[in-house]
Image (cartoon, grey):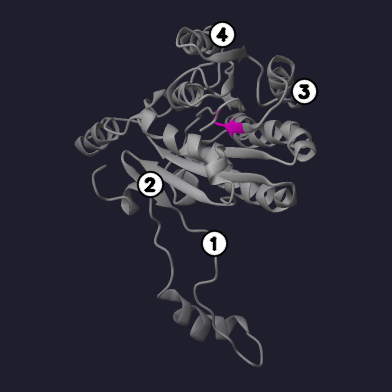
Amino acid sequence: MLQDKVVVVTGAGGGIGRDFALAFAAHGAKVVVNDLGTSVAGEGASAGPAQKVVDEIKATGGEAVASTDSVADWEAAHRIVKTAIDTFGRIDCVVNNAGILRDRFFFNMSVEEWRAVIDVHLNGSFYVSRAAAPYFKSQNSGCYVHMTSTSGLIGNLGQANYSAAKLGIAGLSKSIALDMAKYKVRSNCIAPFAWSRMIGSIPTETPEQQARVEKMKLMETAKIAPLAVYLASDAAQEISGQIFAVRANELFLMSQSRPIRSVHRAGGWTPQDIAEHGMPALRQSFFPLDRTQDVFTWDPL
Protein backbone atom coordinates (compact mmCIF):
# COMPACT_ATOMS: atom_id res chain seq x y z
CA MET A 1 0.00 0.00 0.00
CA LEU A 2 2.96 2.34 0.51
CA GLN A 3 5.32 1.31 -2.27
CA ASP A 4 8.11 3.90 -2.66
CA LYS A 5 6.53 6.37 -0.23
CA VAL A 6 8.90 8.01 2.26
CA VAL A 7 7.73 8.09 5.87
CA VAL A 8 9.22 9.77 8.93
CA VAL A 9 8.32 8.06 12.20
CA THR A 10 9.38 9.85 15.38
CA GLY A 11 9.92 7.91 18.57
CA ALA A 12 10.45 4.80 16.45
CA GLY A 13 13.15 3.13 18.51
CA GLY A 14 10.71 1.00 20.49
CA GLY A 15 7.08 0.28 21.34
CA ILE A 16 4.38 1.59 19.04
CA GLY A 17 6.86 3.63 16.97
CA ARG A 18 9.00 0.59 16.24
CA ASP A 19 5.96 -1.38 15.10
CA PHE A 20 4.96 1.53 12.89
CA ALA A 21 8.38 1.66 11.26
CA LEU A 22 8.45 -2.09 10.64
CA ALA A 23 4.90 -2.10 9.25
CA PHE A 24 5.55 0.84 6.94
CA ALA A 25 8.67 -0.86 5.59
CA ALA A 26 6.81 -4.16 5.16
CA HIS A 27 4.27 -2.33 2.99
CA GLY A 28 6.95 -0.85 0.74
CA ALA A 29 7.76 2.49 2.36
CA LYS A 30 11.22 3.94 2.87
CA VAL A 31 11.46 4.89 6.53
CA VAL A 32 13.30 7.52 8.53
CA VAL A 33 13.52 5.94 11.99
CA ASN A 34 13.80 8.84 14.41
CA ASP A 35 14.53 8.26 18.07
CA LEU A 36 16.61 10.21 20.55
CA GLY A 37 17.18 7.07 22.60
CA THR A 38 16.06 8.55 25.92
CA SER A 39 14.36 7.03 28.92
CA VAL A 40 10.57 7.20 29.26
CA ALA A 41 11.12 10.41 31.24
CA GLY A 42 13.19 11.89 28.40
CA GLU A 43 16.55 11.51 30.10
CA GLY A 44 19.81 10.46 28.43
CA ALA A 45 20.33 9.69 24.76
CA SER A 46 21.50 6.78 22.62
CA ALA A 47 21.77 6.09 18.91
CA GLY A 48 21.22 2.39 19.58
CA PRO A 49 17.41 2.09 19.48
CA ALA A 50 16.94 3.87 16.14
CA GLN A 51 19.81 2.02 14.47
CA LYS A 52 18.55 -1.34 15.74
CA VAL A 53 15.18 -0.78 14.05
CA VAL A 54 16.94 0.33 10.85
CA ASP A 55 18.95 -2.90 10.94
CA GLU A 56 15.75 -4.93 11.39
CA ILE A 57 14.19 -3.26 8.36
CA LYS A 58 17.27 -3.74 6.20
CA ALA A 59 17.52 -7.39 7.25
CA THR A 60 14.15 -8.00 5.59
CA GLY A 61 15.10 -6.16 2.41
CA GLY A 62 13.61 -2.79 3.29
CA GLU A 63 15.08 0.70 3.13
CA ALA A 64 15.57 2.83 6.23
CA VAL A 65 17.85 5.40 7.79
CA ALA A 66 18.32 6.39 11.42
CA SER A 67 17.82 9.87 12.87
CA THR A 68 18.68 10.80 16.44
CA ASP A 69 17.63 14.44 16.38
CA SER A 70 15.18 15.75 19.00
CA VAL A 71 11.65 16.66 17.94
CA ALA A 72 11.58 19.20 20.79
CA ASP A 73 14.05 21.51 19.04
CA TRP A 74 13.04 23.59 16.00
CA GLU A 75 16.30 23.21 14.08
CA ALA A 76 16.65 19.53 14.97
CA ALA A 77 13.10 18.85 13.79
CA HIS A 78 13.99 20.34 10.42
CA ARG A 79 17.03 18.05 10.26
CA ILE A 80 14.74 15.05 10.78
CA VAL A 81 12.73 15.99 7.70
CA LYS A 82 15.89 16.92 5.78
CA THR A 83 17.18 13.39 6.45
CA ALA A 84 14.26 12.05 4.41
CA ILE A 85 14.92 14.51 1.58
CA ASP A 86 18.68 13.93 1.52
CA THR A 87 18.43 10.14 1.73
CA PHE A 88 15.33 9.31 -0.29
CA GLY A 89 14.62 12.48 -2.29
CA ARG A 90 11.15 13.23 -0.94
CA ILE A 91 8.78 12.91 2.01
CA ASP A 92 5.20 11.61 1.90
CA CYS A 93 4.14 11.10 5.50
CA VAL A 94 5.03 12.26 9.02
CA VAL A 95 4.05 10.14 12.00
CA ASN A 96 4.31 12.19 15.19
CA ASN A 97 4.76 9.44 17.75
CA ALA A 98 7.65 10.63 19.97
CA GLY A 99 6.72 11.14 23.60
CA ILE A 100 7.79 11.12 27.22
CA LEU A 101 6.00 10.94 30.55
CA ARG A 102 6.45 13.03 33.68
CA ASP A 103 3.35 11.94 35.58
CA ARG A 104 2.44 13.77 38.77
CA PHE A 105 -0.72 15.13 40.32
CA PHE A 106 -1.42 18.68 39.16
CA PHE A 107 -0.95 20.23 42.58
CA ASN A 108 2.58 18.78 42.80
CA MET A 109 3.65 19.23 39.17
CA SER A 110 6.74 21.37 38.61
CA VAL A 111 7.14 23.80 35.75
CA GLU A 112 10.01 21.64 34.45
CA GLU A 113 7.74 18.56 34.34
CA TRP A 114 5.10 20.59 32.52
CA ARG A 115 7.46 22.06 29.94
CA ALA A 116 9.31 18.82 29.22
CA VAL A 117 6.14 16.96 28.22
CA ILE A 118 4.65 19.89 26.27
CA ASP A 119 7.96 20.35 24.43
CA VAL A 120 8.14 16.77 23.19
CA HIS A 121 4.49 15.99 22.50
CA LEU A 122 2.88 19.25 21.41
CA ASN A 123 5.79 21.44 20.32
CA GLY A 124 7.52 18.43 18.78
CA SER A 125 4.44 17.55 16.73
CA PHE A 126 4.24 21.13 15.49
CA TYR A 127 7.97 21.42 14.74
CA VAL A 128 8.21 18.23 12.66
CA SER A 129 4.88 18.84 10.95
CA ARG A 130 5.86 22.41 10.10
CA ALA A 131 9.23 21.27 8.74
CA ALA A 132 7.49 18.90 6.31
CA ALA A 133 4.78 21.36 5.28
CA PRO A 134 6.69 23.19 2.48
CA TYR A 135 7.52 19.86 0.81
CA PHE A 136 3.94 18.65 1.07
CA LYS A 137 2.64 21.94 -0.27
CA SER A 138 5.01 22.01 -3.26
CA GLN A 139 4.26 18.42 -4.27
CA ASN A 140 0.49 18.84 -3.68
CA SER A 141 0.32 15.75 -1.49
CA GLY A 142 1.22 14.54 1.97
CA CYS A 143 -0.07 12.96 5.12
CA TYR A 144 0.23 13.50 8.85
CA VAL A 145 -0.58 10.89 11.49
CA HIS A 146 -0.46 12.29 15.01
CA MET A 147 -0.64 10.29 18.23
CA THR A 148 -3.18 11.68 20.66
CA SER A 149 -4.51 9.96 23.80
CA THR A 150 -7.75 9.35 25.64
CA SER A 151 -5.94 10.90 28.61
CA GLY A 152 -6.59 14.20 26.83
CA LEU A 153 -9.75 13.30 24.92
CA ILE A 154 -11.47 11.86 28.01
CA GLY A 155 -9.26 12.31 31.08
CA ASN A 156 -6.87 10.62 33.48
CA LEU A 157 -5.38 11.17 36.92
CA GLY A 158 -1.92 12.65 37.41
CA GLN A 159 -1.32 13.62 33.78
CA ALA A 160 -2.14 17.31 33.43
CA ASN A 161 0.92 17.90 31.23
CA TYR A 162 0.38 14.83 29.05
CA SER A 163 -3.40 15.33 28.80
CA ALA A 164 -3.04 18.97 27.80
CA ALA A 165 -0.43 18.12 25.17
CA LYS A 166 -2.47 15.28 23.70
CA LEU A 167 -5.68 17.31 23.48
CA GLY A 168 -3.60 20.11 21.95
CA ILE A 169 -2.38 17.67 19.30
CA ALA A 170 -5.99 16.96 18.33
CA GLY A 171 -6.50 20.69 17.79
CA LEU A 172 -3.24 20.96 15.87
CA SER A 173 -4.23 18.08 13.60
CA LYS A 174 -7.60 19.64 12.80
CA SER A 175 -5.97 22.99 12.00
CA ILE A 176 -3.45 21.32 9.69
CA ALA A 177 -6.28 19.43 7.97
CA LEU A 178 -8.15 22.70 7.38
CA ASP A 179 -5.16 24.82 6.36
CA MET A 180 -3.65 22.29 3.96
CA ALA A 181 -6.75 20.70 2.44
CA LYS A 182 -6.39 22.72 -0.78
CA TYR A 183 -2.93 21.19 -1.22
CA LYS A 184 -4.37 17.67 -0.87
CA VAL A 185 -2.57 17.18 2.45
CA ARG A 186 -4.34 15.09 5.09
CA SER A 187 -4.02 15.09 8.88
CA ASN A 188 -5.52 12.59 11.31
CA CYS A 189 -5.03 11.40 14.90
CA ILE A 190 -4.77 7.99 16.51
CA ALA A 191 -5.36 7.40 20.21
CA PRO A 192 -3.67 4.08 20.97
CA PHE A 193 -4.48 1.56 23.66
CA ALA A 194 -1.40 -0.63 24.01
CA TRP A 195 1.03 -1.99 26.55
CA SER A 196 4.39 -0.35 25.98
CA ARG A 197 7.41 1.05 27.80
CA MET A 198 5.61 4.40 27.91
CA ILE A 199 2.86 3.11 30.19
CA GLY A 200 4.87 0.39 31.91
CA SER A 201 5.34 2.69 34.91
CA ILE A 202 1.63 2.69 35.82
CA PRO A 203 1.30 1.92 39.55
CA THR A 204 0.26 -1.65 40.44
CA GLU A 205 -0.12 -1.30 44.19
CA THR A 206 -3.79 -2.27 44.51
CA PRO A 207 -5.69 -5.30 43.16
CA GLU A 208 -7.70 -2.95 40.94
CA GLN A 209 -4.52 -1.47 39.47
CA GLN A 210 -3.00 -4.91 38.97
CA ALA A 211 -6.12 -6.14 37.16
CA ARG A 212 -6.12 -3.06 34.93
CA VAL A 213 -2.49 -3.57 33.94
CA GLU A 214 -3.07 -7.24 33.13
CA LYS A 215 -5.86 -6.24 30.76
CA MET A 216 -3.64 -3.62 29.17
CA LYS A 217 -0.97 -6.20 28.49
CA LEU A 218 -3.43 -7.89 26.12
CA MET A 219 -3.36 -4.82 23.90
CA GLU A 220 -0.29 -5.30 21.71
CA THR A 221 1.51 -2.33 20.18
CA ALA A 222 1.53 -4.03 16.77
CA LYS A 223 -2.27 -3.78 16.69
CA ILE A 224 -2.00 -0.01 16.16
CA ALA A 225 0.19 -0.16 13.05
CA PRO A 226 -2.37 -1.29 10.41
CA LEU A 227 -4.44 1.87 10.90
CA ALA A 228 -1.35 4.07 10.58
CA VAL A 229 -0.34 2.28 7.37
CA TYR A 230 -3.83 2.72 5.97
CA LEU A 231 -4.00 6.43 6.85
CA ALA A 232 -0.64 7.00 5.14
CA SER A 233 -1.79 5.24 1.96
CA ASP A 234 -3.59 6.60 -1.09
CA ALA A 235 -6.58 4.48 -0.08
CA ALA A 236 -7.23 7.06 2.67
CA GLN A 237 -6.93 10.12 0.43
CA GLU A 238 -10.44 11.32 1.36
CA ILE A 239 -9.94 10.98 5.13
CA SER A 240 -8.73 14.03 7.05
CA GLY A 241 -9.43 15.83 10.30
CA GLN A 242 -10.55 12.65 12.09
CA ILE A 243 -9.64 11.14 15.46
CA PHE A 244 -9.45 7.36 15.69
CA ALA A 245 -8.70 5.01 18.56
CA VAL A 246 -7.37 1.46 18.44
CA ARG A 247 -7.88 -1.00 21.29
CA ALA A 248 -6.65 -4.52 20.52
CA ASN A 249 -8.96 -5.61 17.64
CA GLU A 250 -11.35 -2.66 18.01
CA LEU A 251 -11.33 0.51 15.89
CA PHE A 252 -13.14 3.60 17.13
CA LEU A 253 -14.04 6.92 15.58
CA MET A 254 -13.89 9.44 18.41
CA SER A 255 -16.28 12.36 18.78
CA GLN A 256 -15.22 15.99 18.49
CA SER A 257 -16.57 18.92 20.49
CA ARG A 258 -19.93 20.19 19.26
CA PRO A 259 -22.84 21.94 21.02
CA ILE A 260 -25.13 19.40 22.67
CA ARG A 261 -27.72 21.57 24.42
CA SER A 262 -28.64 25.25 24.64
CA VAL A 263 -30.87 27.61 26.58
CA HIS A 264 -32.09 31.04 25.49
CA ARG A 265 -33.47 34.04 27.32
CA ALA A 266 -34.78 36.91 25.19
CA GLY A 267 -33.82 39.61 27.67
CA GLY A 268 -30.36 38.25 28.35
CA TRP A 269 -29.01 36.54 31.44
CA THR A 270 -28.16 37.71 34.92
CA PRO A 271 -26.03 35.58 37.24
CA GLN A 272 -29.19 34.85 39.24
CA ASP A 273 -31.08 33.76 36.12
CA ILE A 274 -28.23 31.44 35.19
CA ALA A 275 -28.30 29.93 38.67
CA GLU A 276 -32.07 29.48 38.75
CA HIS A 277 -32.86 28.58 35.13
CA GLY A 278 -29.80 28.24 32.90
CA MET A 279 -27.75 25.67 34.78
CA PRO A 280 -30.72 23.49 35.84
CA ALA A 281 -31.70 23.21 32.16
CA LEU A 282 -28.16 22.31 31.08
CA ARG A 283 -27.24 20.12 34.04
CA GLN A 284 -28.85 16.96 32.71
CA SER A 285 -26.34 17.03 29.84
CA PHE A 286 -23.24 17.66 31.96
CA PHE A 287 -20.32 15.28 31.54
CA PRO A 288 -19.16 13.43 34.65
CA LEU A 289 -15.52 13.49 35.77
CA ASP A 290 -14.77 10.37 33.74
CA ARG A 291 -11.40 8.77 33.29
CA THR A 292 -10.60 6.58 30.29
CA GLN A 293 -11.33 3.37 32.21
CA ASP A 294 -14.73 4.74 33.21
CA VAL A 295 -15.71 5.06 29.54
CA PHE A 296 -14.02 1.93 28.16
CA THR A 297 -15.43 -0.42 30.76
CA TRP A 298 -15.30 -3.68 28.80
CA ASP A 299 -12.32 -5.96 28.33
CA PRO A 300 -10.22 -5.54 25.16
CA LEU A 301 -11.64 -7.60 22.31
**Which quadrant holds residue 158?**
top left
Which amino acid, mark 2? Leu
- Earlier in the chain: of badge 2 and badge 4, it is 4
Residue 88 visible from this viewpoint: yes
* In front: label 2 or label 1: 2
* In front: label 2 or label 3: 2
**Which quadrant holds residue 272?**
bottom right
- Earlier in the chain: of badge 3 and badge 1, it is 3
Magenta-drawn segment: 94-98
Q: Residue at 72%, 32% (x, y): give it.
A: 132
Which amino acid, mark 1? Ser
Q: Is residue 97 left or right of residue 129?
A: left
* Mark 3 closeness class: few <14, some 14–19, many ≥20 residues within 10 Å: some
Quick check: 28 above or below 264? Answer: above
Residue topped by disc 3: 75
The residues bearing labels 2 and 1 have C-alpha atoms spaced at a distance of 20 Å
Residue 96 drawn in magenta: yes
Which amino acid, mark 4? Ser
Labelled disc at residue 46: 4
Q: Residue 50 versus residue 84: which sits nearer the camera?
A: 84
Residue topped by disc 1: 257
